Image (cartoon, helix red, strand yellow):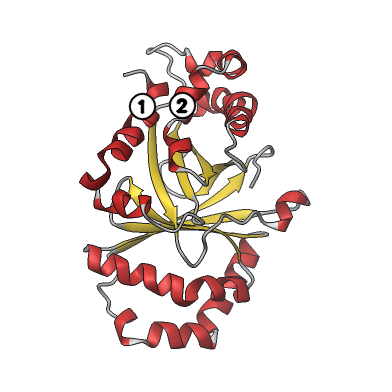
Amino acid sequence: MDRRKFLSTSIAAAVVAGPASSALGAAQGSDSSREYYELRRYHLTTPQRKLADDFFRTALVPGLNRLGISPVGVFSVSIGPEGPSTYVLMPSASVETLATAEARLAGDAEYMKAGADFLNASSNQPSFVRLETSLMMALAGAPKLIVPAATAQKGPRMFELRTYESATDQDHKVKVEQVNNGEVAIFNKAGFWPVFFGDTLIGGKMPNLTYMIGFANLAERDKCWSAFFSAPETKILFGQQKYSSPGLVSNVSNTILTPAAYSQI
């Protein structure tokens, strides 16, 4: 299959399936004020990095913006496994917009011209190694993505991407409830810049929820996490019996990301 069509085909198939996917079926009937997020991870080799960066900057981000997908975040991995790689975050009020983006971009002459070298790379010199993608719906407690003030000010910023996996759907729902019922507010109070909180509908390591928080630098990150865990609200929230089970979360993964100069987040 043409790699450009992979994403739109897989997500669109899931959308059409509707009731066949309980998570997506539920999302389709949910509060329309909650956004959807597509998060891509491009696995790269070092020689591929410039080609990919040029593609994201000159073709993908402008092309997505023309489809109404904005702001688009582009991030490189500073601390995390399987580098080098680049994450691309795409928010939208409509799941259909994300599902059909690749097909619509294929009909965008400006996108196809600007991205020709990346899109038409040969199999013996591919433009990337592998692409992972997930589709998320915003949590009720954080229905929309928030761009940090530091982005508009072009100030220093880094981001932490965290994924919380659960062994069962029941445990996952309880963890989502915990985040909705207090964690988002505590992140704000602790000094973090909450960007998005998403419940994964399609992707790997399900069930899971994923969120992104920002900070100026690693020293500020440590300071914010210390404030988070020492906050009275944290102790009350995590002390509740339904949230204190050691099996509520089976695995936590986190990655530190640095935004590209042209990233809109």
Type of the residue with mark 1: Phe
Residue 58, by quadrant, is top right
Residue density around tag 1, few if under 14, some if 14–19, many if 20 or more, within 10 Å: some
- Compared across the picture, whether 81 is left or right of 167 comes to right
Say if mark 2 contacts mark 1, CB within 8 Å: yes
**Camera-side residue of 245 and 90:** 90
Task: Look at the numbered disc 2 and give the secondary structure of its residue.
Answer: helix
Task: Report x, y in % for residue 223.
Answer: 61, 72
Q: Which residue is mark 1?
A: 6
| Residue 12 in view here | yes
State the CA–CA distance, disc 2 to disc 1: 8 Å
Instruction: Locate the N terminus and report the quarter of the image it occupies.
Output: top left
Q: Which residue is mark 2?
A: 102
Task: Look at the numbered disc 1 and give the secondary structure of its residue.
Answer: helix
The residue located at (43%, 83%) in the rendering is 237
Q: Is residue 126 above or below residue 86?
A: above
